[in-house]
Amino acid sequence: MPVNRTRPSGGAGERLAQKRRTRKAIVDAAMALLARGRTPSVNDVAAAADVSRRTVYLYFPSFDQLLMDATLGVLSQAPVAAALAKTAARADPEASIDALVRALHRVTPETERLGRSLIRLTVHPPPSAERAAAPRRGYRRIDWIESALAPLRPRLGARRWRRLVCAVAMVVGWEALIVQRDICGLNATQGEALSRWAARSLVREALRERK
């Protein structure tokens, strides 16, 4: 029988991590089904993710939102994985975060349109308190940033490392891209350069604080 992965356990940090894992499991299941060339149903995704239909709708008020999120995952997963793999052997977090930013910003107009649509669907407050407690988007970005910055965790400690991950998440991704395009009037090349500079600066500042 499908299980409800949203059941809280431990402290607030562990509950948030569990919610991220549940959301990831749902979207990864949808991505795998899409990659096979089929459009899945809610039941298909719930079964593949080993969760209930209720859990799927707890994280995604509409099934179209889930399919959009999964499609973006399919489009971005390969270039990001390739970028991180190229820098993994160097164990250089600054180089890894730079490669990640470049991969995230080099999107097609269609991918950008999907990203903007996903934000539009997730900015409004959820209809229930239970949904409000769940992360609405960005879990992939957090996972990728954590992977790029993993070598710094022992040096910074859990609290400072987590702060750095969150800070980098603010200067890369769809929200940053929209600010660059719509508010600052930057083109794609200028926006990518700005995010790369901001992310590298945050890494350097975090390291400087530890000296």
Image (tube, rainbow, N blue to C red):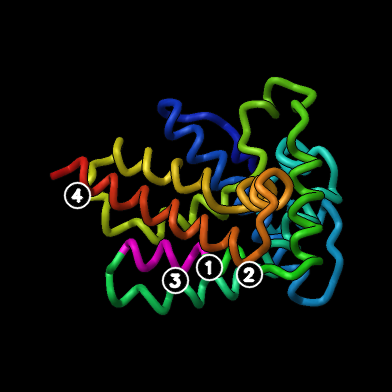
* First of labels 3, 2 by sequence position: 3
- Which label sits on residue 116? none
- Say if mark 1 contacts mark 2, CB within 8 Å: yes
- Can residue 40 be seen from the camera position used here? yes
User: Where residue 125 sits in the image (x, y, percent)?
Assistant: 75, 26
Q: From the image, state whether disc 4 or disc 1 is nearer to you.
A: 1
Other residues around mark 3 within 10 Å, as few (<14) / some (14–19) / many (≥20): many
Q: CA distance from mark 4 to mark 1?
A: 25 Å
In this view, 53 is above or below 8 = below
Residue type highlighted by circle 2: Arg
- The amino acid at mark 4 is Arg
User: Mark 4–mark 1 contact, CB under 8 Å?
Assistant: no
The residue that mark 2 highlights is 106
Query: Which region of the structure is painted magenta?
Result: 93-101
Q: Does residue 99 belong to the magenta stretch?
A: yes
How far apart in space, not on screen, are marks 3 and 2 (Cα)? 15 Å
Going 47% across and 30% down the picture, which residue do you hit? 9
Amino acid under label 1?
Answer: Arg
Q: Which residue is mark 4?
A: 155
Viewer-nearest residue: 190 or 94 = 190
**Residue at image x 53%, y 68%?**
102
Q: Position of residue 141 (x, y in %)?
A: 55, 53
The residue labelled by disc 1 is 102
Task: Give neighbour class at mark 4: few <14, some 14-19, many 20+ (Cα, 10 Å).
Answer: few
